[in-house]
Image: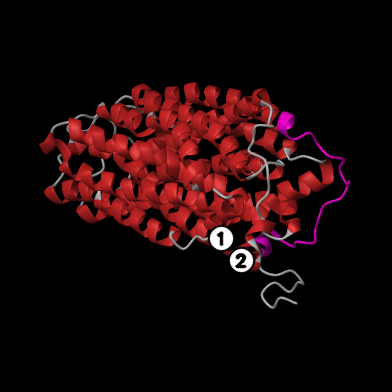
Amino acid sequence: MNAATGSEAPLPDERAPAAVADVGDGAEVPRPALVRYALGSAGMGVYVTVPGLLLLYFLTDTLGVTPWLAGLALLVPKAVDIVLHPYVGSLSDRERARRGSRLRLLTAGCALAPAFVALFAVPGPVADRPWAAALWVAAWFVVANALFAAYQVPYLATPTDMETGYHGRTRVLSFRMVVLTVGILVGGALAPLLAGEGDSVGRYVVMALVLGVFTVVFQYVGVGGVRDLLPAPAPTGKAVDRHGPALAQVRDVLRRNRPFRVLVSCYLLVSTTTHLVLAGLPYYARHELDRPGFTTVLMAAFVAPALLTTPLWFRLSRTWGKQRCLLLCQGFFAAGALGLAAGKTAGLVVPVLCTLVLGVCFAGLQLFPFSMVPDTVRAADGDETGRTGAYTGVWTATEATGAAAGPYLYSAALALGGYAAARAGEEVTQSGGAHTAILLGFTLLPALLMAAALAVQSRYRLDAELTRARGV
């Protein structure tokens, strides 16, 4: 009996690589269903981008909330996700066991759009009081995050639930990544244009309404794609309770599955870094480049390369393996972030080029970790796919934690530098310390975080075993 797991099965780390090298390159997956599944990511892309890009800026420069309080208003709701996402994952596993699919929970998540609008629709009497405004945003952020979890967790369980192999999972996720990029691009480019320079709450509400409609339409398309990719098996009529409560499952999957544990640790740093960059982008454009409207340009430069490079990363991974490609992305991302420190002294060309480098790396930073999660699940003992939701719940909780930590770290840097908050229409002159905080928080801090992610990821060994077993 294995002392670490309390079972007769050896730890996943102790298995022969050939035992986990499942087959299938994804060519057998019907393309129309795959496209419909991937289209569900367009709506997800909007939601993961717009709050990360604009919500901190909305709080500090439209509602007049001080940076430390604004950061707290975004951090606390995401802290709820640490418990919520594993619970949703456990619930989705029970739904699949009881009903044969995760579709009911997935469909419930399509109610996200109204909560997304409410985030920015702060009533006048509430907007006049910074503390009340921060509380309003935090409360609706909790609701929106819960609905997003209801969609995201079962949606991301799909590649693991499918019967396909090492490269097949990367192919499925590459389709998703291309469409996710479109959603991120739509949200990241349109949101600043529709919101203007943050001169009124009304502009933000219009922005949220337009993008909310976009989100819900593509969410429903994604539900149909999941239904087509995973014809429901005969349900058992009862839940599977042998894995225990949700939090116990979190402890169990992290303890049992070392490759997954390393991947989660690394992705926490990656998610923190990318969301910090998103949160800092409007401040960098306005205060360091003296071009508030340049946020859209930089956002497009950050996201658009993924449309071209995701297929290239997929092809390269077939030769190099996912791990080597991911380490390459992390190293170049850190270098690109440091290059942004040149600011306006180097003209606008250098910041744009450095942002393009970040964008090329961002494509790989999303594609490879997400496609490696199913590898870690499949590499574990045979019944692990019966709790795919538990794994995706832990994974999305990690992503949500990074989404909170990134803006919070940047808001902390702003607070330490003495950044002055402002209400809509007010002009505030920032101190030299605030400018230093804006710049270093956007360049040096993400470079250090990504370097730490690279160091953690270098401890991941499963990909080498899988590629050796397949002769890659």
Q: Is residue 1 above or below residue 318?
A: below
- Reading the image, the residue beneath label 2 is 13
Helix, strand or loop at mark 1: helix
Q: Depth check: 327 or 102 in front?
A: 327
Range covered by the magenta-colored residues: 227-250
Give the percent coordinates (x, y) of residue 367: 50, 41
Residue drawn at (65%, 25%) of the image: 31
Residue drawn at (32%, 30%) of the image: 301
Asked if residue 222 shows in the view, the reply is: yes
- Would you say 253 lies left or right of 208 here? right
- Would you say 349 lies left or right of 251 here? left
Q: Is residue 238 in the magenta section?
A: yes
* Residue type at tag 2: Asp
- Reading the image, the residue beneath label 1 is 259
Q: Is residue 172 in the magenta section?
A: no
Marks 1/2 in contact by CB < 8 Å: the verdict is yes
Label 2 CA crowd tier, 10 Å (few <14, some 14–19, many 20+): some
- The chief SS type of the magenta part is loop
Label 1 CA crowd tier, 10 Å (few <14, some 14–19, many 20+): many
Give the percent coordinates (x, y) of residue 259: 56, 60
- Would you say 158 lies left or right of 235 here? left
Residue drawn at (50%, 45%) of the image: 368
Asked if residue 411 shows in the view, the reply is: no
| Most distant residue in the front direction | 471
Helix, strand or loop at mark 2: helix
Residue drawn at (43%, 60%) of the image: 458
Q: Is residue 466 above or below residue 109?
A: below
Q: Depth check: 104 or 168 in front?
A: 168
